[in-house]
Image (cartoon, rainbow, N blue to C red):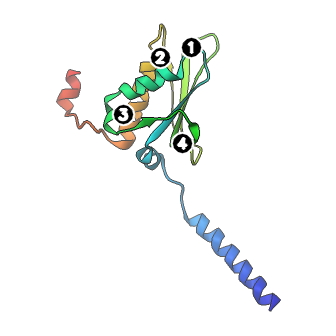
């Protein structure tokens, strides 16, 4: 009986290992497409999280996707982190899926005199459009006129 129980246990463990190997983690497109809420974190005095949140909410695509900014990191699907390179005007950012801790976007923006919020928000949304699709369905002719 002990031998049967032991073999059953070994079989169950090996089946679980095989099942885990067969499943793949979601790709960036999937993670960004299913995201509904964002948390903004700034590690620099030169960028206030509220200003970046406001800039993201002001983007037409962000509104069209009906995305939200939350003040509680544990409720967010994505976490936006911004850092400033010391003694420079270089701001680097990452957008991370909170559940999988996967970085889905990253970039660097150079900015002077308070334009960093809009530039980071615009760059994030542009990268999201590539992964998620354009919710505004602009024609190529109208995007040239902008």
Which residue in the structure is indicated by mark 3?
Answer: 62
Q: Give the residue at x 62% y 23%.
A: 43
Asked if the residues shown at circle 3 and circle 1 are in contact, with their CB atoms under 8 angstroms apart, the answer is: no
**Quick one: quadrant of the C terminus?**
top left
Of callouts 4 and 2, the N-terminal one? 4
Give the number of the disc on residue 84: none
The location of residue 133, given as percent across then percent down, is 32, 42
Of callouts 4 and 3, the N-terminal one? 3
Farthest residue in the bottom direction? 1
User: Residues under labels 2 and 3: Cα distance?
Assistant: 18 Å
User: Residues under labels 4 and 3: Cα distance?
Assistant: 18 Å
Which residue in the structure is indicated by mark 2?
Answer: 116
Labels 2, 3: front one: 3
21 sits to left or right of 136: right
Asked if the residues shown at circle 1 and circle 4 are in contact, with their CB atoms under 8 angstroms apart, the answer is: no
Q: Quadrant of residue 35?
A: top left
Looking at the picture, does residue 41 appear above or below residue 29? above
Give the number of the disc on residue 75: 4
User: Residues under labels 3 and 1: Cα distance?
Assistant: 24 Å
Q: Give the residue at x 38% y 31%.
A: 126
User: Residues under labels 1 and 4: Cα distance?
Assistant: 26 Å
Q: Give the residue at x 41% y 34%.
A: 127
Looking at the picture, does residue 126 appear above or below residue 102? above
Of callouts 1 and 4, the N-terminal one? 1
Which residue in the structure is indicated by mark 1?
Answer: 46
**Quick one: quadrant of the N terminus?**
bottom right
User: Dot 3 lies on which element?
Assistant: helix
Asked if the residues shown at circle 4 and circle 2 are in contact, with their CB atoms under 8 angstroms apart, the answer is: no
The location of residue 61, given as percent across then percent down, is 33, 33
User: Dot 2 lies on which element?
Assistant: helix
């Amino acid at each position: 009986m002990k031998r049967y129980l032991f073999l059953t246990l070994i079989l169950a463990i090996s089946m679980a290992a095989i099942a885990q190997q067969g499943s793949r983690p979601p790709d960036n497109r999937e993670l960004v497409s299913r995201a509904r809420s964002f948390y903004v974190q700034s590690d620099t005095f030169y960028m206030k999280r509220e200003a970046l949140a406001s800039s993201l909410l002001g983007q037409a695509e962000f509104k069209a996707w009906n995305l939200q900014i939350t003040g509680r990191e544990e409720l967010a699907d994505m976490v936006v982190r911004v850092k400033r390179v010391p003694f420079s005007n270089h701001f680097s950012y990452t957008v991370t899926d909170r559940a999988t801790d996967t970085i889905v976007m990253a970039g660097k923006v150079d900015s002077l005199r308070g334009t960093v919020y809009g530039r980071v928000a615009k760059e994030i949304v542009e990268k999201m459009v590539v992964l998620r699709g354009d919710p505004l369905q602009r024609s190529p002719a109208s995007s040239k006129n902008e």
